[in-house]
Image (cartoon, rainbow, N blue to C red):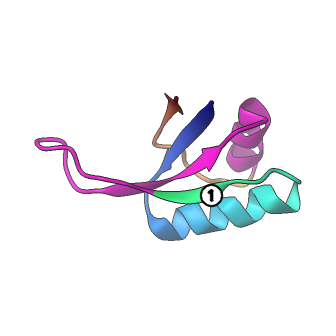
Amino acid sequence: MDNLIKLSSVTQAMKARDILRKHGINSKVHRIPAVKGQGACSYGLLINKNLIKAVEILRDNNIKIAGRADIL
């Protein structure tokens, strides 16, 4: 199961991906389509391992997380 960390922009997603890579956590930038009535599309990171550690690392590096979800 993958986990999705939602971020505010593609720039933030790429920055977060690079930070996690330096800490040995692989992730992939993923475009999240807009949902009717809930605003524009956004971007996030797909992570399949170490979600809690990834969130801690991003917060320690001042990356604001807009949300999280489990992807089956």
Q: Is residue 44 left or right of residue 27?
A: left
Q: Residue at x 61, y 36 (%)?
A: 2
Magenta-drawn stretch contains 49? yes
Amino acid type at image mark 1: Lys
- Horizontally, residue 62 falls left or right of residue 56, namely left
Q: Find residue 3 and report its image quarter.
A: top right
Q: Which of the 4 image quadrants contains residue 31? A: bottom left
Q: Position of residue 56 (x, y in %)?
A: 75, 38
Where does residue 49 sit, x and y in percent of width and height? 76, 36
Residue at (49% x, 57% y) in the render: 30
Instruction: Say if the magenta span includes residue 45.
Output: yes
- Measuring from the top left, give residue 70's x and y in whole percent: 53, 28
- In the displayed structure image, the side of residue 31 where residue 37 appears, left or right: left
Q: Which quadrant: the N terminus?
A: top right
Using the image as rendered, state which of residue 13 and residue 3 is in the foreground.
3
Q: Is residue 26 left or right of residue 11?
A: right
Q: Within 10 angstroms of label 1, few (less than 14), some, or many (20 or more) residues?
A: some
- Residue 28 place in picture, x, y as percent: 62, 58
The region drawn magenta spans 31-60
Does dot 1 land on a helix, a strand or a loop? strand
Name the residue furthest left. 37
Q: Which residue is at a point 77% across and 46% down the rendered structure image?
A: 57
Q: Which residue is mark 1?
A: 28
